[in-house]
Amino acid sequence: MPKKIVIVESPSKCKTIEKHLGKDYKVLSSKGHVRDLATSGKYGFGVDIENHFAPTYQTIKGKKKVLSELKTEVKKSDMIYLATDPDREGEAISWHLKDALEIKDDQYERVIFNEITKDIVQEAFKNPRKIDDDLVRSQETRRILDRIIGFRLSKLMQSKTGGKSAGRVQSVALKLIVDREKEVQNFIEEEYWTIKAIFKDFEANLEKFNQKKIDIKNELEAKGIIDKLSNAFKIESIDKKNKNKYPKMPFITSSLQQEASTKLNFNAKRTMSIAQRLYEGIDLANETTGLITYMRTDSTRMSDEFIKSTYHYIETNFGKEYLGFVKKNKNKSKVQDAHEAIRPTSINRHPDTIKNYLKEDEYKLYRLIYYRALASLMKEAKVAQTTVILDNNNYQFKATGQSLLFDGYLKIYKDYEKSEEKELPPLDKFKSSVLVANKIEKEQHFTKPPARYTEAKLIKELEELGIGRPSTYAKIIDTLNERNYVEINEKKFIPTEIGIETTEKLLEFFSDLINVKYTAQMETSLDNVAEGKEVWNKLLSDFYQSFEPMVENAFDKMEKKEPELAGEDCPECGSPMVVKNGKYGSFVACSNFPKCKHIKTTKKEKIAITKCPKCEGTIIEKTTKRGKIFYGCDAYPKCDYAMWDKPTGALCEKCGNLLVWKKDKVVCPKCVEKETK
């Protein structure tokens, strides 16, 4: 029996790591966090405020059995290796495991690795350390801080508004969305016009009059200018420049989430879930190995070994002229450089050679990560840019062209980053002569409001402002959706009435707390705790002394929103029935709650759509627990036929499947899926 026990969080890691370590080791999983703050004490914080914010922890529901099984194994072992994730969260889980399993200091070692490959894992076990108490305190402080703010503000919102929750980072993210919506609503569009000259092989746009920038506000002005122009243009100048187009840095968590959103149409939650699988290990032909490094990072650093092997790969496959250099992060002061950027664990493991072992979404994300890391070490592309200024009666028109001189990193990254080529004809020979335009056109435009946030743009904004941590962004966005604070229309966030109301109330009483500057400063303080530069409980004490009086003032002075009357009385006590908001939408309940707990139940009429193609039943409109509509057979569970898109009632001539409505078009989902594959 193995005498060495390794404990990780994820069960899917166990098999991979055990293969790398051999028969002397037994790898077990804690299945994530095992303990969390209790809900005892003042306001249910699980923290003794009067005793230097000492936390009380309790076993998470369903984890008693896991801890019991781990404790049995620990007692039989000579050495325990705590190999949880290489970040603050992982460090905290290791500390909780040590404490809950009553492991002594001389019984354990802490092991970290940024990639789950044989060489790296084995090397990590040769260089163990003890748990870093500062990292644990930083995570613990963040958890206590978020518990205090979340519990107090959520209770306030529930008692005074239609909102369900508030949080340190969540509420600032919502504020950004609400502020942008106000900009959109208050925006007043302005008319403007452009004029362009169309030649045989190119076009030129009016830029200046007498070398000064020109703004054309209406059609009358545009027509007046055109009346002064002829079709004859004189070349005033030709400017030629060669420019370098540099590759981007390898991925960090936030940039991966952004690129996966724009290039692959993956939301942040899906991206992180796929990345987790790629990190933890994939079964290939002759091995089980992690394909990428740890996916929660804000460092762009890559190991010397990886850089060396990638340079060799580039030189072998593309030639010496494609070798680039290692880029330095300009914002190094903000970066936690504990581990590397997100990169493939081996540059020699090309996406196409392992495609058959990956699911479609795994292949797409791995390919994106692979090419981004490879491109970052390749030579920059070189483009020739030509700018031509044409004069027509003292009106200056500009034409630009661009051609690729050397493709550099674009040789492999062109699928993700287009290089626009728009060459101008050779105009040097016409410099002393006149160019004649085929026609001159005017066009009306209107200024546009600032764009609403997409998921990718919101993540980018949060990162640039230093709000939260990249690993939390997916959860923040999920929470805003679940709380009904935002709606998503054409991939853009639009705050709901409840979201706007919640934000306005918080800003009325907590403007010093719910703002970008304060939230970013708190992140810096948490980093300082991790580095041993700040005392964790002093940070909490200073915060609480200013926060709690604000909360008490808000409970006293914040005006309570009157509930919406349902227009009927309670059949049990006669009190008015009111509309309330719950987890799965609105419902009607007695206003005399908690004395009267009557809730009106409505039996939704089942809307029959068409006959079920699988059995003799009927396809009806149904609703998930979260209120999302889908269409399924009324004979469920005997028949499990179901779909998200509304069926038309007609059958596909090719396969006999139900045709559905998809974006105002009638399609067969089965045939579309086959064509896509």
Image (cartoon, rainbow, N blue to C red):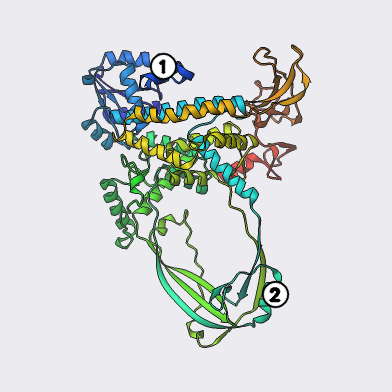
Identify residue type, mark 2.
Lys
Relative side of 335 to 268, left or right: left
133 relative position to 630: left or right: left
CA distance separating discs 2 and 1 = 76 Å
Q: SS at mark 2?
A: helix
Q: Is residue 296 visible?
A: no
Which numbered disc covers residue 59?
Answer: 1
Question: Which residue appears at 55% of the width and 38% of the height?
Answer: 174
In the figure, is residue 625 to the left or right of 328? right
Q: Residue lying farthest bottom?
A: 432
Q: Is disc 1 placed on a helix, strand or loop?
A: strand
From the image, state whether disc 2 or disc 1 is nearer to you.
Answer: 2
Q: Quadrant of the N terminus?
A: top left
Please state which amino acid type lies under the numbered disc 1.
Answer: Thr
Q: Which mark is residue 173?
A: none
Residue 385 visible somewhere in the drawing: yes
Left or right: residue 493 compared with residue 238: right
* Residue 595 rendering spot, x and y as whole percentages: 66, 12
> Where is mark 2, residue-wise?
223
- Residue 131 appears at what percent x and percent y? 27, 27
Can you give x and y, in whole percent of width and height, for residue 368 in the image?
A: 44, 47
Q: Farthest residue to the right: give it.
A: 568
Q: Quadrant of the C terminus?
A: top right
Q: In the rendered view, tell whether residue 138 sits above or below residue 328.
A: above
Residue beneath the point at 63% across and 82% down: 231
Measured as percent of width and height from the top left, residue 484 is found at: 61, 33
Find residue 303 and report its image quarter.
top left
Look at 38% across and 47% down and name the residue there.
350
Which class describes the residues within 10 Å of circle 1: few (<14), some (14-19), or many (20+)? Answer: some
Observer-nearest of 543 and 99: 543
Query: Is residue 150 positioned above or below 274 on the image?
Result: above
How packed is label 2: few (under 14 Cα within 10 Å), some, or many (20 or more)? Answer: some
